[in-house]
Amino acid sequence: MKHRRRILFIAAIFLLIGFTFQCAQKSTQKEAPPVLPSTGVLPEVGSAAEEEMPLKPVTDLYAEITPAEIPKEIARLLPVIRKSGSDREAMTAHLQLAWLYGHYKNPSPQYLKALQELDAYLSLDHAAGSDDVVQNWHKTLREIARLSKENKDLREKAEQLKDQVKQLKHLDIEMEKRRQDVK
C-alpha cells in the first residue's frame, strides 16, 4: 500500500510537471505547430526556439486528445517508427509515443514503455538531453519504473509469505491432530 501511494505521488508529480510546462508554454505560444496530414507526425523542427523546447509541439498536438483516441494514436505511430526514412521522423514519433504512453488521459498508462520511448528519443536527439523539462520527465519515469519493479517484487514476496503461512497452518493442524491421537 505504501509503494502504491509512492507511485501515485510520483505520477501526480509527473502530471503536475507536464501541466505546468503546458501552461507556461501556452502563455508564450502564438499558434500551434502544423501537423503533416499524411503521417500526423510533426514537421521537422527548424527554429532555435522550438529546438530549445522539444516537448512544446507534442504537448500542443495532444492538448485536446480524448482517452479513446490515445490507443488509436499509439497504434498509428508504431508503424511510423518502423517505416520512417529519417531519424528526425523516428525521433518525433518516439517523443510522441513517450508522451502518449504516460499521458494522464491514457486509460491504461504504460510508464515503462514511455521510458523506453523517451530513451529512444534521447538516443536520437542528444541536444534534448540538456533540456531540464525532458530530464525531469526522464528521471520521473525512471523512478516510476523502479518503484513499479519494487512493488512487483514485494507483491511476489507477499504471495510467497502467504503460501508459507498456509503451509504452516496446515502443519500446525497436522501436529495438533497427532497430539490428540497420542493422548
Image: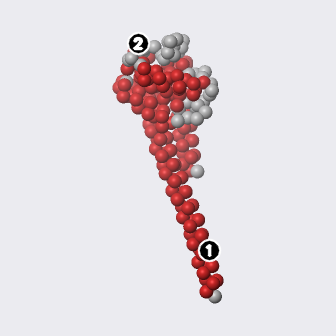
How far apart, in angstroms, are the residues tagged by discs 2 and 1?
A: 75 Å
Q: Nearer the viewer, mark 2 or mark 1?
A: 1
Q: Secondary structure at mark 2?
A: loop
Say which of 113 and 48 sits in front. 113
Q: Is residue 155 left or right of residue 50?
A: right
Query: Which quarter shows the C terminus?
Result: bottom right
Q: Amino acid at mark 1?
A: Ile
Can residue 120 be seen here? The reply is: yes
Q: Position of residue 180 (x, y in %)?
A: 64, 83
Q: Which residue is mark 2?
A: 46
Q: Position of residue 125 (x, y in %)?
A: 37, 24
Say which of 79 and 20 sits in front. 79
Residue at position x 45%, y 34% in the image: 115
Q: Secondary structure at mark 1?
A: helix
* 65 is higher (above) or lower (below) than 177: above
Q: Amino acid at mark 2?
A: Gly
Give yes or no for contact between labels 2 and 1 (Cβ–Cβ under 8 Å): no
Residue at position x 46%, y 21% in the image: 80
Q: Which residue is mark 1?
A: 173
Q: Position of residue 170 (x, y in %)?
A: 59, 70
Q: Position of residue 70 (x, y in %)?
A: 58, 26
Which residue is the extreme one toward the front?
Answer: 181
Residue at position x 59%, y 65% in the image: 166
Of pointers 2 and 1, the one earlier in the residue sequence: 2
Mark 1, other Cα within 10 Å: few <14 / some 14–19 / many ≥20: few
Can residue 140 be seen here? The reply is: no
